[in-house]
Image (spheres, rainbow, N blue to C red):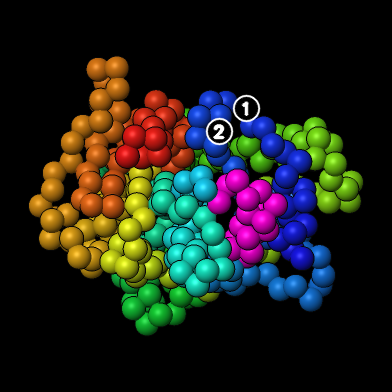
């Protein structure tokens, strides 16, 4: 029922502006349930509490979509997710593979894209102190405080006490922001100060205004349904799962399937730093891990400018994107366009 109602609203918005959708047949679905225009049809419907439940909802949505538009069953499908959405994409992909094998879904599934994705929180947190110190953003005493908290969160994760780990992670982030006097942790080169919102949060009011007026009207959505940019209740419901890594699921996808895994990370992202992404990639246990360790990155040149560095072994590819923070499609459009062309059109 939830998937059907979400699709009934979504299908009215068929055209997107810009070049990527027209070139790559992009469809977008904003999750989670309770975010965007999606809503709970009954008080008995519970909020998702973990990645597996998120994957289940996305599978239900995809089944509804494919039943209404069978032509998409034969079009190559890539699932892209950024930030926490990348973590969702991994579980979505794993469940989709199982559904395809059971004959429950018919679709030409080709791969996933993980953009500055929160795949393994501990790998990112381990770099916070040294990254901030080496960039000259904090003092040694701040580094020591962050290091102590980092050890605490590491112990909590090893105990599988993910709720406690989430609380400690929030303290670490607060410590970094306070010590740096308000650096934008999503893009460290953006103008910011202690009272400024990160860039993506500064869009909240204007986005809500647009979505709850012109977009709502164009979709014929009931006036009593409000667009939610962020839902704090959902964040709270997921609190016990936020710090849980999904590297094991990525290993299963690499070892048991032939889908491509496209990873890309902006070098100016502090929160989901490139160093952390490189670390969890190096730590993956898969059938070509030794080859991955020995392979060197190559420059990705566009119009005689290095826009990124790329490393690929088999179905795993990693783009280190220059001049970009947490959102590569926003910060470095030429690089993102080239990544899409190389991976979706030319591969």
Q: Which mark is residue 275?
A: none
Q: Residue at x 66, y 41 (%)?
A: 204
Image quarter of the C terminus: top left
Q: Position of residue 69 (x, y in %)?
A: 66, 48
Q: Residue at x 82, y 70 (%)?
A: 42
Q: Secondary structure at mark 2?
A: helix
Q: Secondary structure at mark 1?
A: loop
Q: How crowded is the residue under tag 2: few (<14 C-alpha within 10 Å), some, or many (20+)?
A: few
Count the marks: 2
The stretch in magenta equals 57-73
Q: Residue at x 46, y 61 (%)?
A: 93
Q: Position of residue 25 (x, y in %)?
A: 55, 37
Is label 2 or label 1 in front?
Answer: 2
266 sits to left or right of 100: left
Q: Which mark is residue 21?
A: 2
Which quadrant holds residue 44?
bottom right
Instruction: Find out whether the residues at labels 2 and 1 contact each other: C-beta distance under 8 Å.
Output: yes
Look at mark 1 in the image and give the residue it sits on: 17
- State whether residue 114 is above or below residue 104: above
Residue furthest out toward the top: 303
Q: Nearer the viewer, residue 249 or 25?
A: 25
Q: Position of residue 346 (x, y in %)?
A: 34, 34
The kind of secondary structure the magenta stretch mainly shows is: helix
- State whether residue 194 is above or below residue 118: above
Which quadrant holds residue 210?
top right
Q: Nearer the viewer, residue 177 or 275?
A: 275
Q: Position of residue 45 (x, y in %)?
A: 75, 73
Q: Residue at x 59, y 42 (%)?
A: 27
30 sits to left or right of 255: right
């Amino acid at each position: 029922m939830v998937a059907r109602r979400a699709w009934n609203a979504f299908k009215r918005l068929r055209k997107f502006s810009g070049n990527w959708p027209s070139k790559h047949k992009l469809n977008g679905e904003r999750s989670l349930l309770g975010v965007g225009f999606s809503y709970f049809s009954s008080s008995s419907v519970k909020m998702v509490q973990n990645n597996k439940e998120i994957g289940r909802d996305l599978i239900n949505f995809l089944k509804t979509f494919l039943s209404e538009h069978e032509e998409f069953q034969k079009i190559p499908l890539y699932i892209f997710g950024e930030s926490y959405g990348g973590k969702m994409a991994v579980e979505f992909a794993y469940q989709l593979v199982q559904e395809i094998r059971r004959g429950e879904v018919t679709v030409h599934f080709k791969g996933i894209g993980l953009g500055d994705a929160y795949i393994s929180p501990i790998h990112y947190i381990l770099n916070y102190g040294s990254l901030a110190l080496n960039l000259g953003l904090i003092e040694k005493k701040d580094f020591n405080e962050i290091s102590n908290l980092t050890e605490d969160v590491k112990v909590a994760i090893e105990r599988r006490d993910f709720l406690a780990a989430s609380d400690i992670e929030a303290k670490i982030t607060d410590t970094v922001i306070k010590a740096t006097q308000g650096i934008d942790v999503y893009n460290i080169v953006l103008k910011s100060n202690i009272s400024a919102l990160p860039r993506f949060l500064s869009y909240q009011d204007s986005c809500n205004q647009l979505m709850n007026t012109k977009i709502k009207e164009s979709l014929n959505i009931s006036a009593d349904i409000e667009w939610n940019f962020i839902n704090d209740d959902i964040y709270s419901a997921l609190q016990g799962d936020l710090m849980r890594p999904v590297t094991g699921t990525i290993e299963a996808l690499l070892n048991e399937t032939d889908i491509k895994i496209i990873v890309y990370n902006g070098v100016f992202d502090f929160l989901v730093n490139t160093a952390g992404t490189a670390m969890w990639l190096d730590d993956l246990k898969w059938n070509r891990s030794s080859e991955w360790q020995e392979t060197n990155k190559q420059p990705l040149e566009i119009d005689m400018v290095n826009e990124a560095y790329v490393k690929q072994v088999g179905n795993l590819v990693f783009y280190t994107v220059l001049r970009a923070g947490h959102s590569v499609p926003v910060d470095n459009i030429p690089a993102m366009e080239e990544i899409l062309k190389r991976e979706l059109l030319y591969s």
